Amino acid sequence: MTAKSLARGASGRDDAAVDAAFPLPLVAADGGFQCDLPASWRQGPGVVGGLQAAVLLDAATRTVADPSRRVRTLTVHFVARAAPGVAHVSARVVRAGRSLSHARATLRCGDTVVAEALATFAAPRTQGATSRLPMPRVPHWSGLSTSRHGAVPPEFTQWLRFRDCLGSPFAASPVPVIGGWGRFADAVPLDARAIAALADAWPPASLAQARAQHPVASVDLRLHFHDLPEPAAPGWVLYRGETHAEHHGFADEGATLWAEDGRVLATVRQNIVSFPAAQA
């Protein structure tokens, strides 16, 4: 599977690949799945974690193979850099009970394991209350200008659009909060795979307090999926992320993603490691 270059796409991407558009196609291979991790989805030298999470979730969902059970949680550990190119995903059902299914998925680049995931699937339940965290009062996305995250934004952001209104990176802010409206550049339906990718698309909230760019990376990513629309449709999401604590170069971050109508799509917890500015 090789990427085919376009001279310039409708979204203005000069070096985008035909098969780099989201979601990436998974092909059955060697008892699992194979995909091509495009260079145009890099954050620094490796492929961004949100795309890895979406690929792992896709493989786990196909392996569970039960449309009545929707994904409820996804936890991903990023154990090595994911290099662009052909990758293999293996997945298995850990247990399928009367109400819950648990699946594990592993992403490999060559012989190297780069990410491990556990996902839980369940059908909707009738008992229990319905509640949600209110969406912050912010300007509508249509009245905001496009935001760039840094003087040289990560390469993967060519596939996305951001309109910050809750904090921006490298702003020397007194509070570690970041966020705003975001969507895919193309008309990508907001299913669980898309939400997994968007959950890792904004810079860490700790960078709101920074004055200059420096390398960061995700150690792990945990998503709780809530009120996803059915059927999924393209649209904007509102993201608000904040740093709860940061010590010894590691930051604990939490975030919420809302749909335009105020429904909570997902809540996120993430561990971020910072590197010295000279380290790539």
Image (cartoon, rainbow, N blue to C red):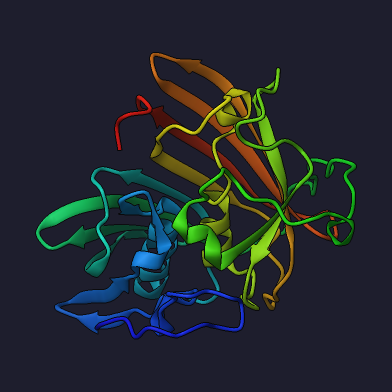
Task: Answer whether residue 60 is visible to the viewer in this image.
Answer: no
For the N terminus, give its image quadrant: bottom left
Question: How far across and down, in percent of the image, does residue 168 sit?
Answer: 68, 37
Q: Quadrant of residue 248?
A: top left
Question: How far across and down, in percent of the image, does residue 58 sit?
Answer: 41, 69
Of all residues, the one furthest to the top in this rendering is: 247
Q: Quadrant of residue 120?
A: bottom left
Left or right of 273 on screen, residue 161: right
Question: How far across and down, in percent of the image, does residue 107 sit?
Answer: 26, 59
In the depicted structure, whether residue 89 falls above or below residue 181: below
Task: Answer whether residue 262 is visible to the viewer in this image.
Answer: yes
Left or right of 90 on screen, residue 219: right
In the depicted structure, whether residue 212 falls above or below residue 231: above
Left or right of 112 on screen, residue 273: right
In the depicted structure, whether residue 19 falls above or below residue 211: below
Of all residues, the one furthest to the left in this rendering is: 111
**Residue at image location 59% in from the left, 26% down from the top:** 243
Camera-nearest residue between 2 and 194 = 2
Disc tally is 0
**Residue at image location 34% in from the left, 52% down from the top:** 117
For the C terminus, give its image quadrant: top left
Left or right of 91 on screen, residue 215: right
Question: How far across and down, in percent of the image, does residue 196 sit?
Answer: 52, 57
In the depicted structure, whether residue 95 falls above or below residue 214: below
Camera-nearest residue between 6 and 43 = 6
Camera-nearest residue between 31 and 276 = 276
**Residue at image location 39% in from the left, 19% down from the top:** 249
**Residue at image location 53% in from the left, 29% down from the top:** 212
